[in-house]
């Protein structure tokens, strides 16, 4: 069983990419940040990671690319995943009852036109898309929606209020498939 660290939880786009990359041979190690992913690999909690490095709307994901340059894991390739954002909330919620929307900062950027068209929706940054909808549902946050995938909305029992809300159709994220490479001890480090 391959232990794969992701930034996010089951239902996030990172988990979709990890499952596609490793099929059923994986154990997801859910992390709240990209830093946490690299810490999980360095501590031995995970041997691999799947992280977003580029999005077709917002371009390079700076935080991830900075950490890859710092930790220098071995790249096993990349994988493109279709990112089809929806707006979801507690079942029975009406769109005009919303006052805020929660999601990962990159997903909020990818839906900036939608948010500009609906200025009454205050954007709140969350850990990832899936944990954002999970929080809305589990904490029963009335008046708040989340930007996530349709699959995550269904997984956590949310109702989809709007579909296809990304700035452009055909939104894709490229994920790096990484393997942790322990630093070799040299005579100078002994």
Image: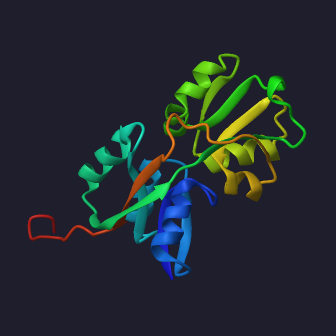
Furthest-top residue in this view: 119
Seen at 49% across and 63% down, the residue is 17
Side of 145 where 148 appears, left or right: left
Q: How many marks?
A: 0
Which is nearer the eye, 115 or 45?
115
Seen at 80% across and 29% down, the residue is 95
Residue 43, visible in the rendered structure: no
Furthest-right residue in this view: 92
Which is nearer the eye, 118 or 179?
118
Residue 42 spot, x, y in % from top left: 37, 63
Side of 99 where 36 appears, left or right: left
Residue 28 spot, x, y in % from top left: 55, 68
Residue 136 spot, x, y in % from top left: 76, 40
In the rendered view, tell whether residue 23 sits above or below residue 96: below
Residue 23, visible in the rendered structure: yes
In the rendered view, tell whether residue 117 sits above or below residue 138: above
Which is nearer the eye, 67 or 128?
128
In the rendered view, tell whether residue 95 sits above or below residue 134: above
Q: Quadrant of residue 179?
A: bottom left
Seen at 62% across and 41% down, the residue is 164
Which is nearer the eye, 182 or 80?
80
Residue 126 spot, x, y in % from top left: 60, 38
């Amino acid at each position: 069983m391959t232990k794969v660290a992701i930034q996010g939880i089951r239902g996030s786009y990172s988990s979709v990419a990890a499952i596609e990359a490793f099929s059923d041979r994986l154990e997801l190690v859910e992390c709240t940040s990209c830093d946490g992913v690299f810490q999980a690999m360095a501590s031995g909690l995970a041997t691999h990671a799947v992280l977003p490095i580029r999005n077709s709307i917002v371009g390079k994901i700076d935080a991830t690319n900075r950490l890859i340059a710092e930790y220098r894991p071995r790249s096993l390739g990349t994988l493109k995943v279709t990112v089809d954002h929806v707006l979801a909330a507690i079942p029975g919620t009406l769109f005009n009852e919303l006052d805020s929307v929660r999601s990962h900062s990159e997903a909020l950027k990818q839906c900036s036109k939608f948010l500009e068209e609906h200025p009454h929706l205050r954007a709140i940054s969350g850990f990832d898309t899936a944990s954002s909808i999970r929080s809305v549902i589990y904490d029963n946050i009335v008046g708040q929606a989340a930007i996530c995938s349709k699959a995550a909305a269904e997984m956590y029992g949310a109702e989809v209020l709007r579909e296809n809300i990304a700035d452009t159709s055909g939104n894709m994220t490229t994920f790096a498939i990484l393997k942790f490479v322990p630093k070799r001890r040299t005579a100078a480090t002994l």
